[in-house]
Image (spheres, rainbow, N blue to C red):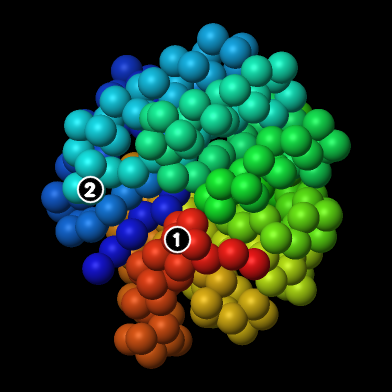
Amino acid sequence: MIIDIHAHSWVYDNVNRDDLILKVIEKFGIDKIYISNVYAPSPTEEEVGLANKAAETLAKSHPEHIGAFLYLSPEHQNALDVLKRGIEDQGFEGVKFWLSTFCDDMVVNKSVERIIDYGVPLLIHSFHKSTGQMDNESIGVNVANLAKRYPELKIIMAHLGGNCYNGIPAIRDCKNVWVDISSSIYRADDLNYTVENIGVDRVLFGTDCPIAYSSCIGQVLEADLTNEEKDRIFYKNALKVLDRSFRL
């Protein structure tokens, strides 16, 4: 079984990623893939609504294979209304923060507290770069700050923090932070390094679909892990994080 915890639905460079998602599900035998639609780095309230409607439509069209995370800009005045509608009415199973604000900015607090109440995970884009760091782009230390402020919050730090040697040390002692491997593994030892430092139970399979699907699967298959440990990464850990009854 394979659960991809981190994928996207959008039209980009005239490529409809909705079609690509369906193709990779079939090609790679993905049992469940979780999408979010990140419409713009600093979206308007209207753009957030359009993004979430598109993700909701795709997920409801293929509920057996596609789930969805709510795209939220917590600095918006209507953020709590968007969150309530998304979880209670639209069927979203998690929440996604992208680039509209640093994830540890105090403006996120009210949204985070509501996310905790719902028992759903918060997926945070986190990507440390040597050059070209984007405005409001969180890195591991930002994720750690939020995790320590809210130890009961289930956090997924995306992309191993972009650079695992920056992101993993920052969240090593934050037991409420899981990491996904999506669009992030460039070196052969990245996954082994991550497991050695935070344990296999805090690692989730993700791809940033349709980016680097083969390499993401291959990294897990070729890692220095037992078959049981690989299964934890491929799906067992995700089932636990997504379970709303699982509380920290």
The answer to which quarter of the image holds residue 172 is bottom right
Instruction: Report the amino acid beneath label 2.
Output: His
Residue beneath the point at 85% across and 37% down: 106
Q: Looking at this view, is 138 or 156 the one in front?
A: 156
Whether residue 73 can be seen here: no
The answer to which quarter of the image holds residue 247 is bottom right
- Residue 182 in percent (x, y) is at 47, 54
In-image side of 122 versus 227 (left or right):
right
- Residue 33 in percent (x, y) is at 32, 49
Residue 219, labelled with which disc?
A: none
- Residue 165 in percent (x, y) is at 70, 66
- Residue 29 in percent (x, y) is at 18, 58
Question: Sequence order check: which comes first, mark 1 or mark 2?
Answer: 2
Q: Looking at this view, is 109 or 210 the one in front?
A: 109
| The C terminus lies in quadrant | bottom right
For label 1, the residue is 243
Residue beneath the point at 47% across and 30% down: 86
**Judging from the image, what secondary structure is the residue with disc 2 in?**
loop
Q: Are marks 1 and 2 in contact (CB under 8 Å)?
A: no
For label 2, the residue is 65
- Above or below residue 171? Residue 89 is above
Total label count? 2
Q: Looking at this view, is 94 or 173 the one in front?
A: 94
